Amino acid sequence: MRWSDGLAVTAEDVRWTWLAQRHPEVAWRYAEIKKNIKNVRVLGLHHFAVEYATESPSQLAELNEGVILPRHAWSALPFAEWPRGAAWFRDHLVTNGPFELAGWESQQRIELRRNPEYFEPDRPYLSSVVLRVVPLRANRLAELEAGKADFVSQLVPAEVRRLEGQPGITIRQFWHRQYDYLAWNLRRPQFAQASVRRALTQAIDRQALVDTVWDGRARIGTSPILASVWAHHPDLEPWPYDLSAARDALLIAGWQADKNGVLRRAGRPFELELLVNSANPIHVDSAVLIQTQLARVGIEVAVRRLDFHALIDRLDSGDFDGAIGSWGIDTSLDLGYAFHSRSITEGYNSGAYAEPTVDRLIEAAREETDQDARREILYRLQEILHRDQPYAFLWEPPRFDAHSTRLRGVGSNPLSSLFRLREWRVGHD
């Protein structure tokens, strides 16, 4: 394996990459993943040893996160300057993948060309690939239909309907590594009781959401571990849409309807602001439907559309009632990111969910290396989260890509729409 400037990729590059990933001045956003690695020792040109603080089922994933960096080229820039070094890295770009950079116009296009130094001599098949930014979704489809583009990713159902059956176009559907949810802020008194959160889930007709915004193609969610994953609890059933049960649970929790049908407790109405990313049409449409559905049990919902960064700021500050979001899961199945109490301040537990048993189970799952024993721990975790409903798990979405039939070897999968791009080719065989 060689870098694009002809020098060998070595174990020294691996060790130096690890030093860069964990260096505080680099402040890599995924540095936490490397905390279990105590040392990387170089044993030879292409051999190294990794020392871990603890044994865990995700050791290989911990090592593999990120890419190998070119020590000979990039060690010239001190780590302290990396956060401000974007222009420097562009001017000193060295790669070791199947393609190398041929051109780049910011916010417009990236052009790749075949890397002649790639270690598989007959790959990639394509001599060049051009990635273009097309801001308007309708224009992306128009270019595919006109033959000016060969591949478009992440279609929404309306776009799938438009393209289905068109000659010269193939649509690929596959399950993505994602679930969508409605998170509640448990700091707010109206969401503090698990019985109320369960009632809210039962007041949301998730099948109607899936039928409306996904054309019935998504799966209703039950858990943060997807139905297609080995550790998904097979006996968990979605909380049913049941307005009567929802009203009874809210009544027991002290909420009573006034003459206008609005729920009140201690004289205060049950009202909430639901935050949603304005750039996500699926989430916006779902928020409007949820607003109508919760009104049927007397809950007043105000939908607030925010740009992504403003939405994240509100979540990080804890200034929200409810928010629709998505998580992409990784192979570690570590649920601490959103459900461990420590992640209230150190992670993404924006809703401040805290359950000591869940904390203990998350920690146990991190260390258990026997797969059967770990499965049982993760089953128990899912049972508690299903009971407590810190999230209303909405759906597991499919992913849709479309490409010209002249493209062969396309391998879209949950890892990436451009998975194994080196295998893609143009032809009609």
Image: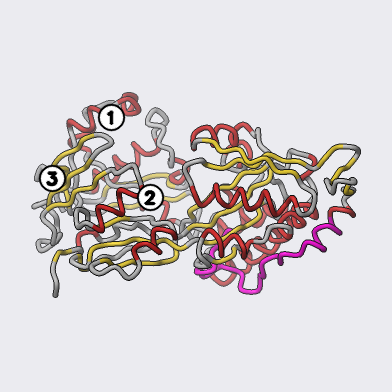
Dot 3 or dot 1: first in sequence order is: 3
Please indicate whether residue 159 sits to the left or right of residue 231 in the image: left
Q: Amino acid at mark 3?
A: Ser
Callout 1 touching callout 2 (CB < 8 Å): no
Give 329 or 45, whichever is nearer the viewer.
329
Q: Give amino acid for label 2.
A: Glu
Report the magenta residues as a range.
Answer: 223-249
The residue nearer to you, when weighing 122 against 408, is: 408
Element assignment for label 2 = loop
Nearest the viewer among 356 and 390 is: 390
Q: Residue at x 66, y 36 (%)?
A: 320
Q: CA distance from mark 3 to mark 1?
A: 19 Å
Name the kind of residue labelled 1 in the image. Answer: Ala
Q: x, y percentage for residue 129?
A: 17, 51
Q: Residue at x 49, y 34 (%)?
A: 309
N-terminal-most mark, 1 or 2: 2
- For residue 375, above or below residue 387: below
* Disc 2 to disc 3, C-alpha distance: 22 Å
Q: Which residue is mark 1?
A: 86
The alpha-carbon separation of the residues under discs 1 and 2 comes to 21 Å
* Callout 3: SS: loop
Q: Mark 3, mark 1: which one is toward the viewer?
A: 1
The percent coordinates of residue 108 (x first, y second) are 25, 38
